[in-house]
Image: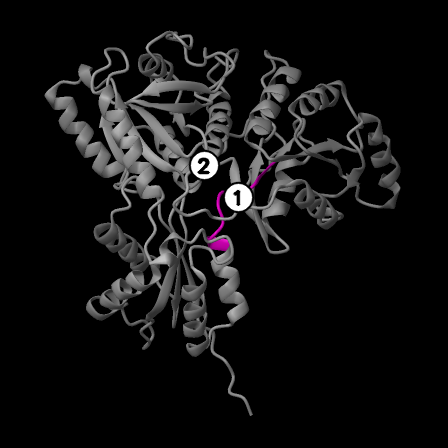
Amino acid sequence: MNDQTHTGDEHGALGDAEYAEFMELAAEEGFDLAEVEGDIAAAGHGPLPVLAVIGRPNVGKSTLVNRIIGRREAVVEDKPGVTRDRVTYEADWNGRRFKVVDTGGWEQDVLGIDASVAMQAEFAIEAADAVVFVVDSKVGATDTDEAVVKLLRRSGKPVVLVANKVDGASGEADAAMLWSLGLGEPYPVSALHGRGTGDLLDAALEALPEAPAQTFGAALGGPRRVALIGRPNVGKSSLLNKVAGEERVVVNEMAGTTRDPVDELIELGGKTWKFVDTAGIRRRVHLQEGADYYASLRTAAAVEKAEVAVVLIDASESISVQDQRILTMAVEAGRALVIAYNKWDTLDEERRFYLEREIERDLVQVPWAMRVNVSARTGRHMEKLVPAIETALAGWETRIPTGRLNAFLGEIVASHPHPIRGGKQPRILFGTQAGTKPPRFVLFASGFLEAGYRRFIERRLREEFGFEGTPIQISVRVREKRSKKK
């Protein structure tokens, strides 16, 4: 069937004939066709472009991030050093979706403000397609700001300069002074009150590339990209050295000793793989306070550049909250996922028993992830890593034809209908897979589908079609009641 191999540039995963049939069905069911088209287009695009927000502490970055994403999620506090569980958020402006990386304002006095800001900026720039550089217009450009400007110039990434805290016309002159940074026009905004943020976002979207169109069944050129991530000192460097067959990176008992990361091309399982940004956190950041925050930024940068995330967990210790955060970050980024339990050779039978119970209890959100038990020190079971990565990538790229999907959904609705709520029983009318990498489904329903029923649909999709090692994204479009024409 030709539709299955259609590249989907125009209609997500759908071929022309399939798309026409699908839209006809949507019209018969009373859906707004423009909205249906938008849903399919949104789900059918590849990874979203990334916008990083950087700047000194307390210039208003997190306030601006909250303004951009339209909700209060990024922590806003005058005291530097607030640890965040998340640093990446999805945003939408004028119908275009993109990701925002919030670098916060953490600083460590003993490292010096210049060093900490520079490290944050480097982390964010690596992950970004474009950068929003925030400067406090009331303070003006500082030496730290000048240092960040040098980093930005070296990166070659597009930059939008923001003069924040311009609350009225009187602050426009202060903003104009920032032309001296040599980054072009400073956009005067008040992140707190929303003044000027629309013009800023217009400029940011011009700097960002469009979300790439989906290319079904066609892998990107070059080696597949693998992010080796995990909390500090779980053995990432040891594992990389073992798979590389040589000492590529420094290994030290002290967490955070990894050198500046460089993408590593490694022969493994008869193929060349690119291990991207394998460092957990950089050298110098060896103090306990703040290390988790820097690790989160590094992980976000690595995951955004990768196709599959290999999350390393120390099997000799209890699964930590930070392990779970890193797994959640990989899932939310929509990457294929392999969990590698390191130091497996050191476990006795009792510890293995309890680890299985911990996995059942603490990693219940990712039962579909590929799993390998390895030893970075001895190389035990290292040969199982490549098959796990390949299986996860295959699941990540799996595509189900619309006809087969709807036959499956029909069986589900017939055998396991949605529970009745308030005297009504919502039904799935039809659906389509509008994207892969990861698989994205759009379901069209007669009413709201509860979260538990969506999870049931996901579980049944996995039972029927596999999708091993990949998250699945399901969005639901509810048919609105339409007033009868006179």
- 437 over 486 or under it: above or below: above
Considering the image in quadrants, where does the C terminus appear? Answer: bottom right
Give the farthest residue toward the bottom: 486
Q: Residues within 10 Å of mark 1 (few under 14, many from 20)?
A: many
The part of the chain drawn in magenta is 42-51
Please identify the quarter of the rendering in which residue 219 is found.
top left
Residue found 16% across the figure and 22% down from its top = 351
Q: Is residue 45 magenta?
A: yes
Q: Is residue 479 above or below residue 368?
A: below
- Tell me where residue 259 appears, x and y as whole percent: 49, 11
Q: Amino acid at mark 2?
A: Leu
Q: Is residue 27 above or below residue 285?
A: below
Decide which of 311, 358 is in the foreground and name it: 311
Apparent side of residue 301 relative to residue 406 in the rendered image (left or right): right
Q: Is residue 318 visible?
A: no
Helix, strand or loop under label 2: loop
Q: Earlier in the sequence, mark 2 or mark 1?
A: 1
Q: Which mark is residue 71?
A: none
Q: Residue 139: x, y in percent?
A: 79, 28
The vertical placement of 259 against 472, above or below, is above
Q: Quadrant of residue 150?
A: top right
Query: 408 left or right of 275?
Result: left
> Which residue is painted at 66% across and 45% down in the image?
205
Q: Is residue 49 magenta?
A: yes
- Magenta part, dominant SS: loop
Circle 2 residue: 220
* Distance from Cα at disc 2 to Cα at disc 1: 16 Å
**What residue does disc 1 label?**
48
Residue displayed at 25% across by 51% down: 465
Amino acid type at circle 1 is Leu
Q: Residue 449: x, y in percent? A: 36, 64
Name the residue at the left extreme.
349
